[in-house]
Image: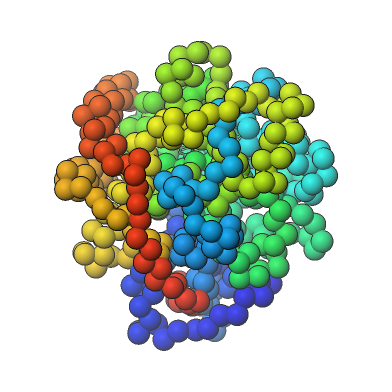
């Protein structure tokens, strides 16, 4: 088990109790020292479960829900702070895709993560890769899976837009073997925190890869989506694919009675305001700052209208990963073109602002109302009044949409109306808010607050 030393705090007095919400990474279950601890599925996403015994205490010493101290982790992991707190430390930015068209098509954007994982296995650099697999243990759920062959990696290609607890997979590592780990930003930061603290299994991870992560959905989104499409409760779902078909892909759900629901990605995005996870709203990391290789969709008219298939933005953060990606490019396994980091960053300006300024403002707002919010050890140096006002609109929309009556209503509007309508509103809103959301973003200065997050152990019932 994990070798981290922990202490049990007096829950009544522990200030961390007030700052506990769950990012569903599973680090606490992994660290609890109790073999029965696990992540239990719920309608709001996976939550830690520890049997009610003396050992029934969650170890949240690497918990992104409390907030991982990013400045400290940067110093420990990279030996320095990033020049840009927007995108993190960058060796090179490229745009491109896996040269093998089947892998490119299977991937969420360009299949780059899948191809790199396969290459790490093929070249003997790793023995296994921790990836997310939709359909395990049942079609509507997703779990961490340790792939040991290129085919198994390919079978797990694509994005899963519900939370998947990835950290507990570390408990299944075999001694002496080396692994790659794929995770969302909270998970990769938690993994690095475990490595920083000397966790033996976390240190078996040689390479960390991760998607840029904007928003994930609560599992309720799928339930509502099925109801809104009049799928009966007894009609069992047999498969869910979030980005089936040609980029940007569509949600595809199949049921036992033969129903096949398909919804283009830009349409089913209407589920986001109604079912977005708390983690998505509070996280400050969009670009997966602690992944050696971070990959996002290349949202740009140049690629979106080319109609040739998915294209990824590919960021290397360490010399080792840079050497591997460049080797793969030289061998023709990846088709890549170097990009100007500023221009590449512009493709994701909206989401960078959503996380880096919006995430901070939403966290402050939650604390104001006495609700838990993570502390990442830094804050934006300045946020203009206009941006704060825009946040008022954004947060109000999220607040209203996530209420039970709003969800009830949305479930009754046909998707053929809601999808295009939402897409139209989204594009108009992006155009209107663009000047405010982009203003000052290029010069995103931060103030380090480093509220040393301490080892802490708390009762599972304290999780919000
Ligand atoms: C929840 C979520 C939100 C995202 N939001 C954005 C966004 O706003 N903007 C943007 O540009 N890109 C976003 N992405 C990233 C994008 O969807 C692609 O994952 C990324 O471009 C990598 O593409 P790829 O083809 O190289 O990956 P692939 O080759 O398809 O490989 C993806 C790998 O990630 C693993 N994986 C998938 N989902 C998860 C998960 N939930 N947790 C852990 N591992 C997972 C898979 O098992 C697979 O190994 C998001 C991804 C996720 C999972």
Q: Where is residue 388 drawn, in percent x and y?
A: 20, 48
Residue appearing at x 51%, y 13% in the figure: 307
Q: In the displayed structure, would residue 382 be above or below residue 453? A: above
Q: How many marks?
A: 0
Q: Nearer the viewer, residue 12 or 37?
A: 12
Q: Nearer the viewer, residue 421 or 285?
A: 285
Instruction: Tell me if I can see residue 288 in this picture.
Output: yes
Q: In the displayed structure, would residue 101 be above or below residue 86? A: above
Q: Where is residue 164 drawn, in percent x and y?
A: 53, 50
Q: Where is residue 375 drawn, in percent x and y?
A: 38, 64
Residue appearing at x 63%, y 64% in the figure: 195
In the rendered image, the quadrant that contains the C terminus is bottom left
Q: Nearer the viewer, residue 381 or 230?
A: 381
In the rendered image, the quadrant that contains the N terminus is bottom right
Q: Nearer the viewer, residue 257 or 129?
A: 129
Q: Where is residue 203 drawn, in percent x and y?
A: 69, 62
Q: In the displayed structure, would residue 307 be above or below residue 403? A: above
Quarter of the image for residue 108 reads: top right
Residue appearing at x 81%, y 38% in the figure: 122
Judged left or right of residue 321, residue 62 is left
Judged left or right of residue 45, residue 192 is right
Judged left or right of residue 457, residue 271 is left
Residue appearing at x 42%, y 50% in the figure: 85
Q: In the displayed structure, would residue 342 be above or below residue 90? A: above
Instruction: Tell me if I can see residue 437 in this picture.
Output: no
Colour basis: rainbow
């Amino acid at each position: 088990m994990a070798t981290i030393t922990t202490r049990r705090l007096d829950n009544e007095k522990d200030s961390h109790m007030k700052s506990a919400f769950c990012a569903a990474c599973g680090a606490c279950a992994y660290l609890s020292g109790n073999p029965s601890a696990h992540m239990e599925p719920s309608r709001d996403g996976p939550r830690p479960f520890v049997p009610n015994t003396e050992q029934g205490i969650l170890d949240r010493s690497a918990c992104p829900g409390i907030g991982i101290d990013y400045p400290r982790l940067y110093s420990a992991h990279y030996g320095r702070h990033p020049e840009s707190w927007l995108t993190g430390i960058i060796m090179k930015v490229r745009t491109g895709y896996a040269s093998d068209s089947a892998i490119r098509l299977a991937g969420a954007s360009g299949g780059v993560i899948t191809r790199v994982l396969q290459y790490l296995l093929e070249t003997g650099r790793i023995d296994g890769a921790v990836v997310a697999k939709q359909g395990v243990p049942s079609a509507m759920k997703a779990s961490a899976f340790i792939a040991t062959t290129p085919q198994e990696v390919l079978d797990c290609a694509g994005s899963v837009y519900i939370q998947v607890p990835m950290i507990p997979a570390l408990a299944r590592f075999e001694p002496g073997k080396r692994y790659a780990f794929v995770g969302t930003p909270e998970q990769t930061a938690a993994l690095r925190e475990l490595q920083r603290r000397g966790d033996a299994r976390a240190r078996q991870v040689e390479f960390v890869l991760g998607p840029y992560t904007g928003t994930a959905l609560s599992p309720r989104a799928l339930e509502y989506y099925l109801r809104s499409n009049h799928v009966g409760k007894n009609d069992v779902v047999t498969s869910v694919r979030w980005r089936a078909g040609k980029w940007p892909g569509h949600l595809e759900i199949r049921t036992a009675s033969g129903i096949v629901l398909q919804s283009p990605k830009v349409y089913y995005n209407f589920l986001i305001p109604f079912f977005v996870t708390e983690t998505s709203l509070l996280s400050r990391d969009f670009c997966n700052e602690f992944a050696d290789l971070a990959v996002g969709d290349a949202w740009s008219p140049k690629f979106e209208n080319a109609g040739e298939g998915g294209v990824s933005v590919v960021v290397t953060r360490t010399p080792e990963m840079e050497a591997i990606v460049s080797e793969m490019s030289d061998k023709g396994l990846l088709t890549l073109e170097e990009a100007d980091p500023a221009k590449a960053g512009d493709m994701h300006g909206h989401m960078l602002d959503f996380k880096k300024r919006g995430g901070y403002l939403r966290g402050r707002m939650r604390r104001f109302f006495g609700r838990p919010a993570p502390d990442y050890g830094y804050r934006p140096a300045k946020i203009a009044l206009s941006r704060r006002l825009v946040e008022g609109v954004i947060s109000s929309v999220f607040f209203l949409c996530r209420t039970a009556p709003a969800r009830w209503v949305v479930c009754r509007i046909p998707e053929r109306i809601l999808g295009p309508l939402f897409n139209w509103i989204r594009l108009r809103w992006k155009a209107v808010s663009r000047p405010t959301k982009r203003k000052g973003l290029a010069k995103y200065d931060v103030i380090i607050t480093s509220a040393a997050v301490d080892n802490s152990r708390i009762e599972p019932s304290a999780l919000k």
